[in-house]
Amino acid sequence: MDKKNNNFRKTNDVVLVFPRTGSMDIKGILIEIPQSVLFIASYLIKEGFSVKIIDQRIDDNWKETLKREAVGAKLVGISAMTGKQIHYGLEIAKFVRKNSNAKIVWGGIHPSIMPEQTIKNNLVDLVVVGEGEETVIDLLKKDWEKVKGIYFKKNGKIIKTPPRDFLDLNDTPPLPFHLLKMNNYFIPFVGVKALHLHTSRGCPYRCAFCYNRVFNKGLWRCMNAKKVADTIEYVTKKFGVGGIVFAEDNTFVNSKRVEDIFKELDKRNIHIKWKADCRIDYLDGASEDFLSFLEEHGLDTLDIGVESGCDKTLKKIQKDITTEQIYRVNKKLAKRNIKLRYSFMMGMPEETK
């Protein structure tokens, strides 16, 4: 075999790129696993396609990596939310256009909410609206006009296909953590090494400022307790993780599911520290027994979006909570070893200094 054949490297079918986000890109604190592209990669691997993930937040030589990995690729996927990620995503797309023949596919929150605006850009060949896991598989197997949930350009005309149904999250394949340099995603948390995980999607509430009303249609979907416990067991044993950050929109929609997750972990003798987001009205209605269960099972911190200290503003943004509930919950949890972190939104319409 000659030297040229010895150097042969199989090309990737798909390269998935997660752009920088700007000021949030603080390694060891705010940079979490690029879940959006990791879930898509799991489906590609299950179907036998080769895939590479490039995380621009941690790869200072991303141009070299992208130029090397996108050779022969059919698709380069870019995931973006509204804000700085669009700027960096366009930088990536411009580089792809100059150095690869791959089609440039945009997905994520911003392209899904603004698909017509997105597809008009000449650095966009196709927009995936909503969840992209099954859509990307179809893009590789079918004529694009037969693929649900996309916008694309054909002969200068924008074509929109019918929407795609939501996934059953219990059918998702195991996440391919081996595609990532995992040391870049661990964070310190109450004396242990922690990792962000997504175990549910969406939210049933109607907050006027939130992407969920469009992206998830006001629906909440989750992995069952066993599947969540399987993932937690894997990362604790594989990476020595002792903490989990449930980095999702609404962990506590089903309180029984939360209990079931930790009862399942008890059976496996797995004990973790953890944090999650929670609505104030959930805590207002939570029993003392449930709060004790959470405390006994490692809950350290709850991030709570109260958004405003003004009832008029809360009503206007359809948060469906009151300042009275906020005060009541704060008193209720003051005697417990559960930290509460409140987040506020500033500059709402009609607000004064």
Image: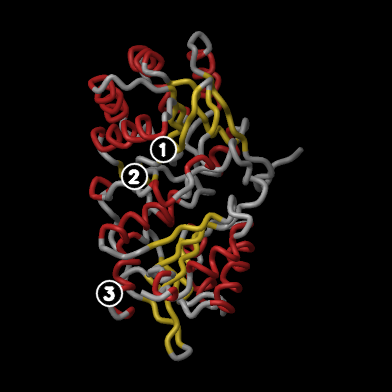
Amino acid type indicated by mark 1? Asn
Query: Residue 297 location in percent, x, y?
Result: 37, 18
Q: Residues within 10 Å of mark 3 (few under 14, many from 20)?
A: few
Please give the name of the residue rendered at 35% of the width and 66% of the height, measured from the top-left corner: 136
Circle 2 residue:
220
Above or below, 125 relative to 344: below
Please give the name of the residue rendered at 37% of the width and 43% of the height, measured from the top-left corner: 204
Q: Nearer the viewer, residue 190 or 61?
A: 61
Q: Residues within 10 Å of mark 1 (few under 14, many from 20)?
A: many
SS for dot 2: strand
N-terminal of the pair, mark 1 or mark 2, is 2
N-terminal of the pair, mark 3 or mark 1, is 3
Circle 3 residue:
141
SS for dot 3: helix
Q: CA distance from mark 3 to mark 1?
A: 34 Å
Do residues under tags 3 and 1 come within 8 Å of each other at their CB atoms? no
Above or below, 213 relative to 123: above
Give the quadrant of the C terminus. top right
Circle 1 residue:
250
Q: Nearer the viewer, residue 95 or 84?
A: 95
- In this figure, which colouring scheme has been used for the structure? secondary structure
Q: CA distance from mark 1 to mark 2?
A: 8 Å
Left or right of 82 on screen, residue 148: left
Amino acid type indicated by mark 3? Lys
Please give the name of the residue rendered at 53% of the width and 21% of the height, measured from the top-left corner: 190
Do residues under tags 1 and 2 come within 8 Å of each other at their CB atoms? yes
Query: Residue 199 location in percent, x, y?
Result: 35, 40
Above or below, 352 relative to 188: below
Discs 3/2, front: 3
N-terminal of the pair, mark 3 or mark 2, is 3
